[in-house]
Amino acid sequence: MAALLKDQINADLVRRLAAQLQHHHDPFAVDAFVRSITAELEGLELKDRINVIADTIAEYLPSDYPTALAIVVRVAEDDVEPWAAWSLCSFVERHGTGAPEESLAAMPTLTKRWSCEFAVRPFLDQHLTLTLAHVRRWADDENEAVRRLASEGSRPLLPWGPKVPALSADPRIGIEILTTLRHDPSETVRRSVANHLNDVTKSHPELVVDVLQRWIDETDPVDAKLVRHALRTLVKQGHTGALELLGFTTDPQISVTLFSCSPARIGLGSPITLTAAIDSTSATEQHLVVDFVIHHVNASGATSPKVFKWANQRLAPRATVELTKRRKIQPASTRTYHAGVHRVELQIAGRCFATTQFELTLP
């Protein structure tokens, strides 16, 4: 069995971090620090372990926050390992909002070791104007990790990140930052821009389509991969504006003559194979977004749908295409499978055109 991520946060890591803290602050009580943390780690999940280390750092460093922060920054400037660096970011997140200017000034150094995307959230919530001034500067930084922080940290729906009401209420705050980053030379930064825009599509889909249309129409058009990734949720929903922007057919003229799933009954860890035959009833070529939707059985016996990508398919006039898709039904960190009949839909341009099913059995 693969090791759990939380197990990376262990006594050995704590002791190595303690040695680095002592290197920059000689009175640091290494042994007491390590004992205090390791006594609490057992039974805690990943983020809770990080927070325990962050809070214990605050306990064992000088009580004057700017002094403690300077030590933390010097440790980050060393070759501190990533898991330990996360706890340094968490120290600022949990203990630094009373000194926002000093904390925000430290984040470009910290984020080069571990992203400060979580750490910046309470500052955006409590010190919005000041924090945005820093974020705008980060968007022009020479380091791609700092530029990514500008986009990722200001996402309205940052996974694992606390909500920032101002960002949800007015997504234009974030889009202003993204405009600076839309042609970033780093693929990592551009992907963050796309993920940020995808967040915004959940509440303001038309705004995102309009912004991307402007960026496409510029003399220097935005990267097509960024546009596709930003619109992925809207495409799965069959949003007309998103489909049109990407050149897909919004009203498919087709007939589905076959949609099947085999085998009809499987155990967990086995694959299913979907087969679809699609006939064009149009006199012109169509560019189809083909997805499939599995309605997963929940513990209560109800189902919840999940859309999966199948293909982007060009279909000639009056032509027929046969598609196959194999998917393994196996445990995942984001889903617990339950026995029962799982309905599967063939979705094209966001619309259901046919259904099939398979039965999942568990030991």
Image (cartoon, grey):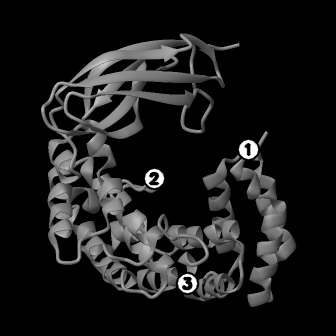
Seen at 48% across and 52% down, the residue is 160
Residue most toward the right? Answer: 31
Q: Which residue is mark 2?
A: 159
Q: Secondary structure at mark 1?
A: loop
In this rendering, position of residue 163 left or right of residue 165: right
- Is 150 drawn above or below residue 353 in the view shown? below
Check disc 3 and give the amino acid type.
Thr
Count up the numbered dots.
Answer: 3
Check disc 1 and give the amino acid type.
Gly
Residue 326 x/y as whole percent: 53, 29
Which comes before the other along the chain, label 1 or label 3? 1
Marks 1/3 in contact by CB < 8 Å: the verdict is: no
* Inter-mark Cα distance, 1 to 3: 32 Å
> Is residue 28 in sight in this rendering?
no
Residue 84 x/y as whole percent: 69, 69
Q: Residues within 10 Å of mark 3 (few under 14, many from 20)?
A: some
Which comes before the other along the chain, label 2 or label 3? 3
* Inter-mark Cα distance, 1 to 2: 23 Å
Q: Which label lies toward us, 1 or 3? A: 3
Q: Which residue is mark 1?
A: 43
Seen at 32% across and 44% down, the residue is 233
Seen at 28% across and 57% down, the residue is 165
In the rendered view of the protein, which quadrant contains the C terminus? top right
Residue 111 x/y as whole percent: 54, 76
Residue 196 x/y as whole percent: 34, 60
Q: Which residue is mark 3?
A: 109
Q: Nearer the viewer, residue 149 or 344?
A: 344
* Inter-mark Cα distance, 2 to 3: 23 Å
Q: Nearer the viewer, residue 50 or 188?
A: 188
